[in-house]
Image: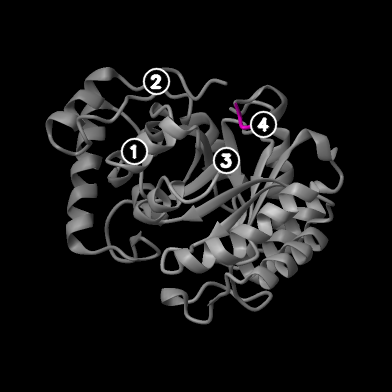
């Protein structure tokens, strides 16, 4: 389920529906996707009531943006929230390579202005609700001195509605929270059913400063959805044995309580008050419909209690609301 942007949570005048679509797959994240498949997925998202769309110049070197822009062009611009990212890229149409080989990082002022202009063209819009600084983990000074200043200018000009950061590093995001005025952070893989390192510093910091967290990567790039075994992916690579063992324990606990692992993984992050939105990914309409259904699946409190007692979930983690994400 999704809440239309007009009635979703407002953080510093930023409209964030509870459920959104992460469009990385439209840019060949792992598997080739045709133009027709991409358009069908976006249309299915729209039909399901989803009004938050997240992409990046990185995904397929702009291919995701181009496809998303083409599909959304038929819908009223005022009815959806659109987010993209700048600072990290790859050649147009290129799929993700192992360890990010072929990607480049550029956090200069000039590149940010040029990248936003190119994103606007590909997305077929004249403004962006959010622009995230993309993976600045090793370049915090450059990102603040270059990209952040450029986005401030564009925010003052009305081209960008809000400035955010997208990262897999809760440490980098916590550091940036103290250095700039950010409306939101897109946090991937760091507050999930599998592990919750963001619970220690980042999420309390965001809650205290009013920084909205958009949570992504709830399946830890795959393993919570597929289970263990050859080819299981964690952090965009093959899952190591220790991670596979922990996932096995989670699957066993879910089986004892009759809970779908994917349902628990989807619902868990929404329990934290700093998490305002959850991004669903994928290239399959069937998977989309399954995930929306699993978001409303009833999960007994005894299940969450067992996960905490067994050390599989941090005891301090807030529990998700019963009956789905709500508004």
Left or right of 316 on screen, residue 110: right
Tell me the mark number nearer the camera, choosing from 1 and 3: 3
Q: Residue at x 36, y 43 (%)?
A: 202
Residue 17 position in % (x across, y down) = 62, 31
Q: Compute the Cα span from label 3 to label 2.
A: 32 Å
Do the residues bearing badges 3 and 4 touch, measured as CB atoms within 8 Å? no
Where does the magenta region start and end? 10-14
The residue pinned by badge 2 equals 298
The residue that appears at 17% across and 27% down in the rendered structure is 306
Please tell me which of labels 4 and 2 falls first in the chain. Answer: 4
Tell me which numbered mark, 3 or 2, is placed earlier along the sequence: 3
- What's the CA distance linking mark 1 and mark 3? 31 Å
- Location of the C terminus by quadrant is top right
User: Tag 2 or tag 1, which sits nearer the N-term?
Assistant: 1
Q: Of 299 and 59, which appears nearest the observer? A: 59
| Mark 1–mark 3 CB contact (< 8 Å) | no
Query: Which residue is label 1 attached to?
Result: 261
Residue topped by disc 4: 13
Rounded to the nearest angstrom, the CA distance separating label 1 from label 2 is: 12 Å
| Classed neighbour count for the residue bearing mark 2: other residues with Cα under 10 Å, few (<14), some (14–19), many (≥20) | some
Assess disc 3: are there few (<14), some (14-19) or many (≥20) residues with their C-alpha within 10 Å of its C-alpha. many
Q: Which residue is mark 3?
A: 183
The kind of secondary structure element at disc 4 is loop
* 294 inside magenta stretch: no
Q: Is residue 244 left or right of residue 274?
A: left
Crowdedness of circle 4 by 10 Å Cα count: few (<14), some, many (20+)? few
Q: Name the one closer to the observer, 149 or 226.
A: 149
Q: Foreground mark, 3 or 2?
A: 3
x and y percent of residue 185 in the render? 51, 46
In the figure, is residue 244 to the left or right of 99?
left
């Amino acid at each position: 389920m999704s809440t239309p942007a007009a009635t979703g949570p407002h953080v510093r005048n930023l409209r964030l529906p509870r459920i959104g679509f992460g469009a990385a797959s439209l840019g060949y994240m792992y598997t080739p996707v045709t133009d027709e498949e991409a358009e069908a997925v976006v249309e299915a998202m729209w039909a399901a009531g989803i009004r938050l769309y997240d992409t990046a110049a990185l995904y397929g070197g702009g291919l995701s943006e181009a496809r998303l822009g083409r599909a959304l062009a038929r819908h009223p611009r005022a009815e959806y929230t659109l987010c993209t990212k700048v600072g990290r890229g790859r050649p147009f149409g290129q799929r993700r390579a192992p360890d990010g080989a072929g990607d480049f990082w550029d956090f200069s002022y000039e590149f940010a202005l040029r990248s936003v202009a190119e994103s606007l063209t590909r997305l077929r819009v004249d403004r962006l609700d959010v622009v995230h600084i993309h993976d600045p983990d090793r370049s915090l000074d450059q990102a603040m001195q270059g990209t952040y200043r450029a986005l401030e200018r564009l925010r003052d000009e009305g081209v960008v509605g809000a400035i955010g950061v997208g990262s897999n590093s809760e440490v980098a995001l916590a550091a940036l929270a103290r250095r700039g005025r950010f409306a939101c952070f897109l946090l991937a893989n760091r507050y999930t059913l599998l592990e919750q390192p963001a619970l220690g510093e980042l999420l309390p910091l965001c809650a205290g400063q009013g920084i909205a967290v958009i949570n992504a990567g709830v399946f830890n790039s795959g393993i919570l959805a597929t289970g263990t075994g050859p080819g299981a992916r964690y952090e965009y690579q093959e899952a190591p044995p220790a991670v596979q063992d922990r996932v096995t324990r989670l699957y066993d606990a879910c089986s004892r309580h009759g809970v779908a692992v994917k349902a628990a993984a989807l619902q868990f992050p929404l329990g934290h008050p700093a998490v305002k939105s959850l991004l669903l990914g994928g290239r399959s309409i069937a998977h989309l419909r399954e995930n929306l259904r699993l978001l409303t699946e009833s999960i007994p409190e005894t299940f969450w209690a067992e996960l905490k007692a067994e050390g599989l979930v941090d005891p301090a983690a807030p529990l998700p609301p019963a009956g789905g994400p709500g508004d």
